[in-house]
Structures are given as structure tokens and as C-alpha cells.
Amino acid sequence: MPSLGLLDAEGQVHRYRVSVLFDTGCIGNVIFLEFCKTIAIYHAKPEYMSIMANQTFQETEETTEPVTLSLRFNTERMKFFATPLRYDVILGKNGKNKHKPAVDCSNYHVNFKHAGNEYMIHANETIKETSLGSRMN
């Protein structure tokens, strides 16, 4: 299946392979609720109501502890909102983002700054279906 113009890349959450979507329209970082339950990432009871892209409201939980996310150039711990969206991880706009990501939609890549260096993550050519059974390395 073609990528449909989405900027997604492979990453890891606690050593499980995940698809990471870069979404400049999303406020905050999101992780798939069922994935959290499968690998025992603890989350609080619903505290927030979020407005989704389709204008519906969704209860949103927050991870109780930071989650380890690895991309090609970096590993760090961060908190996520857990929702029933069917995408493993979504990295959205975050005012606290120290990496200052720059999204290049026409060339399908994201540039990051980290530890004084610049890195580029190219979007995958295909979108992998969400399949919890195929995540282990």
C-alpha cells in the first residue's frame, strides 16, 4: 500500500517495533491504548476529553510514567496521551519539544536537532498495519 503522503517512520517503544507518525496537526504525543495494555505501559483513568480530527470527542488517558521511545538517532523518555487511535505512536506539536522538528512534506522527511547535530528521518515508503503480534525484535 502506498504511504498516502503520511510522514511515518519505524521506531521502538520499550524494544517493541512501532510505526511513528509525525502529525503537525496533533497537539501533544499519542500512543495506542491497546498497545499500552499489551506491553504493560500504565496509564491513568480518563482525565481529558480530546477533540479528534473528525470533530468527535474522545476520552484521553495519560501514561503514568515516561515511556522510552527510540528513533534512528535518539532514545528518550517522554509521556504520552493514550487513546484508542489505531496508530502505534503519533508525535505531534509539543511546545516543550527541545529538538525543534522541521517537517518537509514535499520531500517526506523530518529534520531534528539533537546534541548540536542535525538529523533527518525519511518517511517510510509503506504504512505497516497495526499488528501487536509482530512487534518483538
Image (spheres, helix red, strand yellow):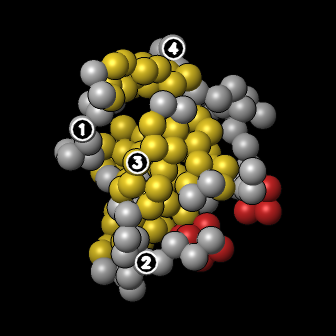
Number of marks drawn? 4
CA gap between label 4 and label 2 equals 36 Å
Q: Is residue 115 above or below residue 47?
A: above
Q: Residue type at mark 2?
A: His
Residue drawn at (30%, 43%) of the image: 93
**Residue drawn where x is 27% and y is 21% of the image:** 116
User: Regarding mark 2 in the picture, which secondary structure is present there?
Assistant: loop
Between the residue at mark 2 and the residue at mark 1, the CA separation in whole angstroms equals: 24 Å
Q: Which residue is mark 1?
A: 98
Q: Which residue is mark 2?
A: 43
* Residue 85 in view, yes or no: no
Q: Secondary structure at mark 4?
A: loop
- Please report contact status of discs 4 and 2: CB closer than 8 Å, yes or no: no
Mark 2 crowdedness (10 Å alpha carbons): few <14, some 14-19, many ≥20: some
Dot 3 or dot 2, earlier in sequence: 2
Q: For the view shown, which residue lies furthest in the front direction?
A: 115
Tag 4 residue: 107
> Which amino acid is tagged 3?
Glu
User: SS of the residue at dot 3?
Assistant: strand
Kind of residue sitting beneath label 4: Asn
Counting residues from the start of the chain, the first of labels 4 and 3 encountered is: 3
Q: Identify the residue shown where x is 78% and y is 34%.
A: 1
Q: Earlier in the sequence, mark 1 or mark 4?
A: 1
Taking the view exactly as shown, the residue that stands out farthest to the left is 95
Amino acid type indicated by mark 1: Lys
Where is mark 3, residue-wise?
A: 76
Q: Mark 3 or mark 2, which is nearer to you?
A: 3
